[in-house]
Amino acid sequence: MALVVTALAPKAAADAAGGAPGPAAPGAVPGRVVSLNLCTDQIAMLIAAPGQLVAVSYLAADPRASAMAAEARAYRLTRGRAEEVFLMRPDLVLAGTFTTPATVDLLRRLGLRVETFPPVDGLAEIGAQIRAIGAAMGRAEAAEALAEGVEAGLAALSAAVRDGAVRPRAALYAANGWTGGEASLSGEILAAAGFANAAAEAGLEGGGFLPLELLIRLAPDLVIPSARYPGASRAEELLSHPALGRLPLSPVATDADWVCGTPAVLRALAGLIAVRDSLGAAPADGTAGAAPVPPAPGLAPGLAPG
């Protein structure tokens, strides 16, 4: 099928589909949007007008990766094949900068408007990402409300961690010993919750593989593991190593809330602040626990922190 579509000229392919979908006219609000990226999926679901979002990626319905898996099941799921997307007749395709380049290129050559968005690597980038997706979808007002709500939530949670607060040393630890450094979204969640990132002591700025032997030598005050996948894998065997059991393990693990720059980050941050407080590292002003944070406007039910 891929060979067939590649061989078709844009006009012939459009005729086969019943008319060219084509990009929307300048300034027009796209009426049919398809998202191919896990993170754009979730933002699009939160801000789309009724009936505007046609399909999201199959990963959006996977609770191990998506904070909105239940909501995603209300949409058509796509594997992101160019011919599949083209036949949905979208006038806007949302993709990530790491979406298969050949797919993005082919869709553009077939006359579709494709907007790509980079991964969010820091908390301060979340609002800008939401606004950019909103602008592409013609949903600037909804995006602004969502972005402002997330930014207000982050500010309220961060107020519980002030200068002078005790900063326990923590390490994120996932399959194969992967850890997030300070220059990553997970690293910034860790810092915002009042922890010092032990990965920095190992010279891992953005992230990388942290050998178990080095983790033991670093002796962090807390190890935050990744949520386990069902079944068994050699990559996750490291998380069951007896030596890891000698270190204090966090009662919460990194999960779908940590993956993308969405309002779910508020829940991840609130949970981690509660863990920090349970270690006795209360805020400098003596208050206990994180400040309550109202749900961001437009936030899907169940995504509010707490």
Image: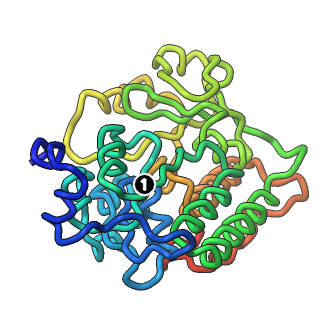
> Can I make out residue 44 in this image?
yes
Q: Is residue 49 left or right of residue 3?
A: right
Quarter of the image holding residue 286? bottom right
Please state the horizontal and vertical placement of residue 143, each as a whole percent of the image: 61, 72
Name, please, the residue furthest toward the bottom. Answer: 50
Of 162 and 99, nearer the camera is 99
Determine whether 267 is above or below 248 in the image.
below
Label 1 neighbour load within 10 Å: few <14, some 14-19, many 20+ = many
Q: Is residue 100 left or right of residue 258?
A: left
Q: How many labels were placed on the picture? A: 1
**Residue drawn at the location 58% of the way across and 47% of the way down:** 120
Please state the horizontal and vertical placement of residue 274, each as a whole percent of the image: 65, 57
**Which residue corresponds to mark 1?**
114
**Residue drawn at the location 29% of the way across and 77% of the way down:** 74
Determine whether 161 is above or below 244 in the image.
below
Q: Is residue 61 left or right of residue 288?
A: left
Q: How is the image coloured?
A: rainbow
Image quarter of the C terminus: bottom right
> For numbered disc 1, what is the local secondary structure?
strand
Please state the horizontal and vertical placement of residue 140, each as a whole percent of the image: 62, 73
Quarter of the image holding residue 31? bottom left
> Can I make out residue 289 in this image?
no
What amino acid is labelled 1 in the image?
Val
**Residue drawn at the location 33% of the way across and 48% of the way down:** 109
Please state the horizontal and vertical placement of residue 183, each as a whole percent of the image: 65, 34
Of 254 and 2, nearer the camera is 2
**Residue drawn at the location 45% of the way across and 64% of the way down:** 42
Of 24 and 214, nearer the camera is 24
